[in-house]
């Protein structure tokens, strides 16, 4: 998974991931019908025909969580009007056990169950100040006649102890909508699709997005790629982002080498209007052969492509871990009583590190940009708890206080990957790095062969060097903060500063504005100065009512931040403010605040050979 918070609190990247499991198929089947044609009150009817049930009671559950999200989401909360029937259509007694599970009596006679599903996009609060929304890329959307985001775990559940039974899912849909997915539609009709999977976990790994057909397909080194886009106003098309996606995915395949054997890969991009009833959780969720991405439609083309590069490459690298290399907690995932693994530093951190390293390795970004990203990660990690054991955090990530530290997987987690990479490069005279370690781990373990959580460090040490083991024990399991300068010095890289244009409303993670809690108005903070406010003669305490004739307050502050990302130096701007009781309109031009930012620079030429092996090897 990767989350991007375009928010007042943080302009941060978050991401999420996901995994599979094994098992032999039985002859029985769970048959599901999802009706997208007759949507009533924004709800979709789901009908489930069970396999033969041999017990008097049976429990049907919709997931509490799914792999890769590392959060408790209770997808069952969005199902209602749950009914069970026998062959004669007589209702059986149903008891709701909790948010996600229903117990059905007289289960031997059970013929079908029905329920209505509400979508999660509608319910997202999305103020960005930390909430328990279902992360949009793992969520569901029901927008009759226009778009359905079918994250299958939001619509389809499983019968207790029947996770290994095959599924046949029939989706009836309007002829105007087309379902984009990596699964194969086994029905020729234009109004019904039939998808079969060998077990529940595979179904969960296969999202489907229905919308007016807008997609491209292309092949990269033997892999078929499908890119499908839903853009509510038609601002973006699949065609418009395909060249950049193709370049990037080709570079990823070249970087990865032999690890990846996926034949088909689908990118589902949902662009949100950011209206109250639309998605607000930005980022993506990974699957073995697909990724769901949700981003704001208001982004500029440049920003959209940049976000897509970062997000899609991250999700794609999840094919290495956890989708191939993972622990038993992930292999035998329990959708309603999940156990977490200790190794988020690897699943999310190494993945995020690769998503940056491959870009410099394949020439998509230059050295300066790579160092800026590393410096940003160090800066953002500083805002989080640097003395919390990463393995303890990972193991307990569903609970506080660990939950709030989750986003450090994209910051410190990636930096852990970098340090291990540097240690291996140094010890092997530049010949090997962390990618080589991941190749070896994927030979050792694999999609069907999980590791025990507590044996991973020893295994990595035996495949690399004692120094890597010491690093893992001291800085990943241990609580000692990592001395990044020490590791970067090994490749001749040291601290430096640069001036860069910042956001008018945010300095790093610190906002230049605040909120009047009572009125939701946006206020210029009196205690900080910035060039943008100064050039428009805005003063501390001024309330910003509208910018460029669009009104803003707490409810749509997201939009303001996102819009401001598109502003260029000297663009004309109109700001309506309230100073005291008096409203006035100010016309001027945009002056972006320039900030001194820390970054890194190669300063020791004697280490060039090792540095080049690290970045270009
Ligand atoms: Zn991820």
Image (cartoon, rainbow, N blue to C red):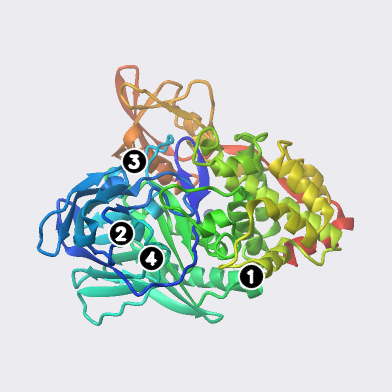
User: Looking at the picture, how far across and down is residue 549, in whole percent?
Assistant: 30, 39
Tell which circle, 2 or 3, labels the residue nearer the N-terminal end.
2
Question: Gap in Å between the C-alphas at discs 1 and 4?
Answer: 26 Å
Question: Gap in Å between the C-alphas at discs 2 and 1?
Answer: 34 Å
Residue 193 falls in image quadrant:
bottom left
Question: Is residue 53 or residue 577 the one in the foreground?
Answer: 53
Tell which circle, 1 or 4, labels the residue nearer the N-terminal end.
4
**Residue corresponding to mark 3:** 548
Marks 3 and 2: in contact by CB < 8 Å?
A: no
Tell which circle, 3 or 4, labels the residue nearer the N-terminal end.
4
**Residue corresponding to mark 4:** 203
Question: Gap in Å between the C-alphas at discs 1 and 3?
Answer: 46 Å
User: Looking at the picture, how far across and down is residue 558, in whole percent?
Assistant: 39, 41
Residue extending furthest right? 606
Quarter holding the C terminus is bottom right
Which of label 1 and label 3 is nearer to you?
1
Q: Residues within 10 Å of mark 4 (few under 14, many from 20)?
A: many
* Disc on res. 256: 1
């Amino acid at each position: 998974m990767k989350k991007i918070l375009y928010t007042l609190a943080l302009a941060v990247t978050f991401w999420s991931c996901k995994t599979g499991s094994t098992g032999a198929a039985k002859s029985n089947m769970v048959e599901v019908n999802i009706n997208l044609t007759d949507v009533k009150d924004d709800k979709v009817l789901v009908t489930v025909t069970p396999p033969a049930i041999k017990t008097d009671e049976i429990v049907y559950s919709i997931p509490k969580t799914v792999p890769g999200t590392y959060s408790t989401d209770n997808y069952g909360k969005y199902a209602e009007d749950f009914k069970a029937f026998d062959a004669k259509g007589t209702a059986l007694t149903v008891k709701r056990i909790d948010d996600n599970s229903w117990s059905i009596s007289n289960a031997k006679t059970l013929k079908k169950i029905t329920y209505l599903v509400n979508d999660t996009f509608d319910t997202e609060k999305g103020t960005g100040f930390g909430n328990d929304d279902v992360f949009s890329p793992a969520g569901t959307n029901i927008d009759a006649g226009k778009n359905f985001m079918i994250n299958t775990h939001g619509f389809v559940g499983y019968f207790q102890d029947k996770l290994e039974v095959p599924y046949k899912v029939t989706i009836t849909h309007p002829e105007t909508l087309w379902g984009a997915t990596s699964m194969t539609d086994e029905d020729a009709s234009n109004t019904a699709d039939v998808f079969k999977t060998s077990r529940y976990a595979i179904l969960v790994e296969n999202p489907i997005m229905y919308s007016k057909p807008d997609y491209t397909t292309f092949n990269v080194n033997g892999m078929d790629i499908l890119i499908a886009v839903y853009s509510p106003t038609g601002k973006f098309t699949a065609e418009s982002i395909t060249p950049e996606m193709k370049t990037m995915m080709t570079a990823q395949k070249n970087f990865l080498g032999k690890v990846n054997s996926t034949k088909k890969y689908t990118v589902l991009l949902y662009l949100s209007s950011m209206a109250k009833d639309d998605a607000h959780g930005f980022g993506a969720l990974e699957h073995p052969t697909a990724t769901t991405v949700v981003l704001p439609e208001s982004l500029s083309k440049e920003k959209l492509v940049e976000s897509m590069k970062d997000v899609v490459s991250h999700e794609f690298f999840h094919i290495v871990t956890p989708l191939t290399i993972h622990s038993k907690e992930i292999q035998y995932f329990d959708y309603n009583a999940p156990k977490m693994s200790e190794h988020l530093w690897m699943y999310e951190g190494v993945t995020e590190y690769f998503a940056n390293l491959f870009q410099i390795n394949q020439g998509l970004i230059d050295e300066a940009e790579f160092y800026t990203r590393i410096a940003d990660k160090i800066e953002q990690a500083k805002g989080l708890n640097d003395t919390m054991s990463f393995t303890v955090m990972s193991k307990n990530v569903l609970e506080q206080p660990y939950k709030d530290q989750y986003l450090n997987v994209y910051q410190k987690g990636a930096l852990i990957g970098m340090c291990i990479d540097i240690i291996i490069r140094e010890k092997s005279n530049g010949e090997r790095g962390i990618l080589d370690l991941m190749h070896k781990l994927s030979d050792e373990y694999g999609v069907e062969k999980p590791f025990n959580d507590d044996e991973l460090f020893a295994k990595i040490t035996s495949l690399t060097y004692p120094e890597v083991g010491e690093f893992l024990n001291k800085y990943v399991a241990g609580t000692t903060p990592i001395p990044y300068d020490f590791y970067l010095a090994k490749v001749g890289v040291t601290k430096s500063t640069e001036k860069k244009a910042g956001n008018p409303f945010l300095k790093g993670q610190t906002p230049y504005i605040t909120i009047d809690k009572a009125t939701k108005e946006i206020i210029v903070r009196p205690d900080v100065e910035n060039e943008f406010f100064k050039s428009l003669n805005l003063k501390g305490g001024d309330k910003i009512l509208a910018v460029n004739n669009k009104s803003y307050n707490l409810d749509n502050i997201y939009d303001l931040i996102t819009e401001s990302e598109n502003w260029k130096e000297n663009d004309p701007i109109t700001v309506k403010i309230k100073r005291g009781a008096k409203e006035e309109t100010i016309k001027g031009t945009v002056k972006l605040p320039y900030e001194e930012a820390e970054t890194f620079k190669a300063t020791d030429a004697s280490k060039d050979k090792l540095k080049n092996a690290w970045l270009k090897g």
